[in-house]
Image (cartoon, rainbow, N blue to C red):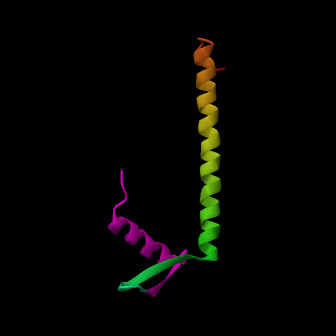
Amino acid sequence: DELSISTLYRNLRKMEAEKLVLSSWEKSEGGPRKRVYTITDEGKKSLEEYINFLKFRKSLMDKLINTYENKINDNNMEVK
């Protein structure tokens, strides 16, 4: 599934309200001004916590997959 532009900007506005990013307007060469987003220290902290959560979930999934594959290879689906 692709992320729609409206969903992206809605989430960026929410993140800005939560002080996770800051935005500013910059001039654009030959076009309208552009809004530029910058991650804040709080945003970096939040991102790091989320990445750690994902790593933890990944380790659980890896264990589940390894257990499943080992039991399939042993032709014994009983888990003790």
The reply, left or right, for residue 25 in relation to residue 55 is left
The residue most toward the front is: 30
Q: Quadrant of residue 35?
A: bottom left
Decide: is 19 above or below 49: below
Q: Identify the residue at image location x=62%, y=36%.
A: 62
Whether residue 8 can be seen here: yes
Give residue 77's position: percent from left, percent from top: 57, 16
Whether residue 16 appears in magenta in the rendering, the answer is yes
Whether residue 66 appears in magenta in the rendering, the answer is no
Q: Identify the residue at image location x=39%, y=67%.
A: 8
The reply, left or right, for residue 20 in relation to residue 32 is right
Give whichever of 76, 28 is nearer the camera: 28
| Viewport quadrant of the C terminus | top right
Q: Identify the residue at image location x=64%, y=33%.
A: 63
Residue range of the region highlighted in magenta in the rendering: 1-27
Give residue 54's position: percent from left, percent from top: 59, 51
Q: Quadrant of residue 68?
A: top right
Give residue 46's position: percent from left, percent from top: 60, 66
Question: How many discs appear?
Answer: 0
